[in-house]
Amino acid sequence: MSDTYILSVSRRTDIPAFYTEWFMNRIYKGKAAYVHPYTGKLIQVELGPEKTAAIIFWSKNMAPLAKRLDELADKGFARYLVHYTITGLGPAWEPRVPKTDDAVETFGRLAKTIGPHRLLWRFDPVVLTENMGVKETLHRFESLCKKLCGMTFSCYTSVVQPYAKIKPRLKDYEDRHHDKVITPREEHYTGLMMGMAETARQSGITVYTCCTPSLDGFGIKAAACIDDKKILDLWPDCGLVPQKAPTRKHCNCSRAVDIGAYDTCPHACLYCYANSRPETIMKRHNEHDPTGPCLVGT
């Protein structure tokens, strides 16, 4: 089992929310494919329980897939973690994400099914504006901590990154809402993270941040969103041979095989690095074939 791998479903799009039927079809077929986003090469992936050390799901709406988790386990895929994003930012930033209370309800049902150790809350990204500063963000975070207390022990967070593809969306937000997105100075960011860490601690939650070693020692731990150690702690006999694969400086993630595709997530969050223009997203989403080997295309 030395050639087992971690399956990522998916950093590139919300498969549980929008493509559960396709994913389960691939599980039954025992194989999937994806087009490498940089080389354009078609990559074939064998989807067998003996090959898959664990699955990591990434979602803002696990409700469609949650209905089929027993079916997934019956096919031999009982080893999985869930990164579940709930930010409470609202429709101005997350136009098609479920309402916060609905997301919390789904989160709670999932916690009862798989347990809080396997359910990883993402308060990610942190967005600060002139009208939504540190004080308002901490208040929203505290409210969510209280709601999710006992359902999870981990919170992953980072500040929104102004990638080139999202800058037009940020500018559009500023124009429509007469607000300005701000990049916090280091002392403000440190204060925010320390406040979040203390607030989370009171609800039994540990805060993890990506690629920010300067926060070590403030009650915050370095994140490994794809965490081979956690997988091996939970399933020591899964056959995984850890292999680090950082995506940027100070990243602690391990290698995973991601079967998703960029520009396919209809959540259309303004801060999302995986989407470009709305018309491109909907075109590719409409081209999706739930019986096909790839999420989109051939």
Image: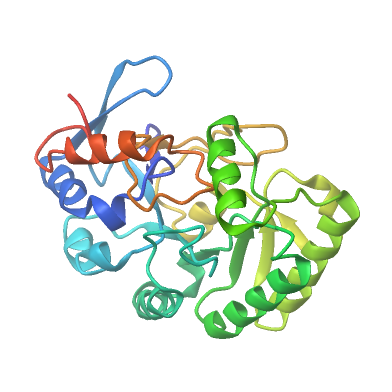
Residue at 16% across, 32% down = 293
In the displayed structure image, the side of residue 86 where residue 177 appears, left or right: right
Residue at 53% across, 43% down = 169
Percent coordinates x, y for residue 24 in the rendering? 17, 51
State whether residue 259 appears in this view: no
Q: Relative to 15, is 294 above or below?
A: above
Residue at 64% across, 39% down = 162
Percent coordinates x, y for residue 298 in the rendering? 17, 24
Quarter of image, res 215: bottom right
Q: In which quarter of the image is the N terminus?
A: top left
Percent coordinates x, y for residue 2 in the rendering? 40, 34
Quarter of image, res 87: bottom right
Quarter of image, res 33: top left
Percent coordinates x, y for residue 47 in the rendering? 23, 39
In the displayed structure image, the side of residue 65 where residue 187 appears, left or right: right
Q: Nearer the viewer, residue 13 or 68?
A: 13
In the displayed structure image, the side of residue 19 where residue 82 appears, left or right: right
Total labels: the figure holds 0
Residue at 79% across, 64% down = 192
Q: Nearer the viewer, residue 244 or 180?
A: 180
State whether residue 162 appears in this view: yes
